Image: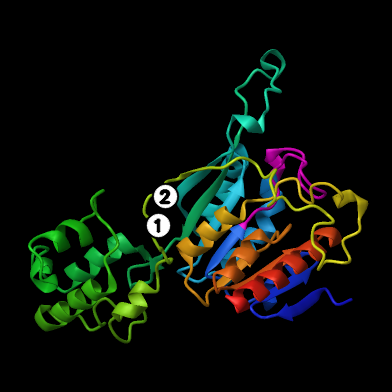
């Protein structure tokens, strides 16, 4: 059997080690990682959190090589597992955005806590941490982060900082937000960068190299600038704490639940198919937040492919890998079912 199965658009399931698949996958718009936790949760998981850096290193390197400037990463783990891997992610160009906490509620421990032996509070949470790519722009004076580069380009034109307000057609927001170097700074929209560039060319001293240029040939266009940031589709009312009990309801997949998966006969999946199945609702939130229809979602450690099922259901293209055959079969059936449901809706 070939390790890669092109099942049916809009997804591709790799049966085997994802390290053999990365090079053939389309560049991702979002990566949803739900791999080793350092708790011996599955065959191949590490024993402790300290071993996670070595476990993730080849994957993080592959993500770095494949990512676009606008690629987002959702990294699922325990609190200590994420904290351990965080420096590795930063070293490979991933910049922290925020932490989402899954609160599973007191029912997750069901009163089975020996405080005298364990000597800690019951753990009822996991985290999923959102990262964006760190953006550096090349200049003749070296690579610069966006905040520094914007001010550098404006000063290169020989213009007073307050004239940025006139350029953008605002009272004081351009100087105070786009060109400041303090905590009030934020990433300007593309149309404002276009206005800064046009004004600099009209009123600047003329420094040879085009102002606000990414390639040294011409000034950046608004759509090009906006494409440098990860997608964010805001959902009002949703915070960074997601409350839901662990899956013990009808969403919990069992080995014999899918009639469309005849190959799922392994006794090891006769009860819960996967020890840490994520709620489809959570995966859909992440896909919807950081992608648009038609975008590419990577799920390197598929398990039951919940992120990819959510991606297919939302009109995205999913690339997923899974090592273990029983999980592969369930993932395939879920993905096929998601395609059928999407086609019928």
The dot on residue 238 is 2
Is 293 within the magenta? Answer: no
Estimate the x, y position of residue 209 in percent, counting from the top left: 26, 82
The dot on residue 132 is none
The residue depicted at 20 percent of the width and 58 percent of the height is 177
Estimate the x, y position of residue 132 in percent, counting from the top left: 46, 59
Label 2 secondary element = loop
Identify the residue position indicated by label 1 in the image: 235
Q: Is residue 21 left or right of residue 89?
A: right
The residue depicted at 21 percent of the width and 72 percent of the height is 192
Is 36 within the magenta? Answer: yes
Estimate the x, y position of residue 84 in percent, counting from the top left: 60, 42
The residues tagged by marks 1 and 2 sit, at their Cα atoms, a distance apart of 6 Å
- Please give the range of residues in magenta: 33-51
**Nearest to the observer: residue 57 or residue 2:** 2
**Nearest to the observer: residue 335 or residue 131:** 335
Specify whether residue 62 is in view. Answer: no
Q: Quadrant of residue 193?
A: bottom left
* Mark 1 neighbour class, 10 Å CA radius: few under 14, some 14 to 19, many 20 or more: few
Residue furthest out toward the top: 116
């Amino acid at each position: 059997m070939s390790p890669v199965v092109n099942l049916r658009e809009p997804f591709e399931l790799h049966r085997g080690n994802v390290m053999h698949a990365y090079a053939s996958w389309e560049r991702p718009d979002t990566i949803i990682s739900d791999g080793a936790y350092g708790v011996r949760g599955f065959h191949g998981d590490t024993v402790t959190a300290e071993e996670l850096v070595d476990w993730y290193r080849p994957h993080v390197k592959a993500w770095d090589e494949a990512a676009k400037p606008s690629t987002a990463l959702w990294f699922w783990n325990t609190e200590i597992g994420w904290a351990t891997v965080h420096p590795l992610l930063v070293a490979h160009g991933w910049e922290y955005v925020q932490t989402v906490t899954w609160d599973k509620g007191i029912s997750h421990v069901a009163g089975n806590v020996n405080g005298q032996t364990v000597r800690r509070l019951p753990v009822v949470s996991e985290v999923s941490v959102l990262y964006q790519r760190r953006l550096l722009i090349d200049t003749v004076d070296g690579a610069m982060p966006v905040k520094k580069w914007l001010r550098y380009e404006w000063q290169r034109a020989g213009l007073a900082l307050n004239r940025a307000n006139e350029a953008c057609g605002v009272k004081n927001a351009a100087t105070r937000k786009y060109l400041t170097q303090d905590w009030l700074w934020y990433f300007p929209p593309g149309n404002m960068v276009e206005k800064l560039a046009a004004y600099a060319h009209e009123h600047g001293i003329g420094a040879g190299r085009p102002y606000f240029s990414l390639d040294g040939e011409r000034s950046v266009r608004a759509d090009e600038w906006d494409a440098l940031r990860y997608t964010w589709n805001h959902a009002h009312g949703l915070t960074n704490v997601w409350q839901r009990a662990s899956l013990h309801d009808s969403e919990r997949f069992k080995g014999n639940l899918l009639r469309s998966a005849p190959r799922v006969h392994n006794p090891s999946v006769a009860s819960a198919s996967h020890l840490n199945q994520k709620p489809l609702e959570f995966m859909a939130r992440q896909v919807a937040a950081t992608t648009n229809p038609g975008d590419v979602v990577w799920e390197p450690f598929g398990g039951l492919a919940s992120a990819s099922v959510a991606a297919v259901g939302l009109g995205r293209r999913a690339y997923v890998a899974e090592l273990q055959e029983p999980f592969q079969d369930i993932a395939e059936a879920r993905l096929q079912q998601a395609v059928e449901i999407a086609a019928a809706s």
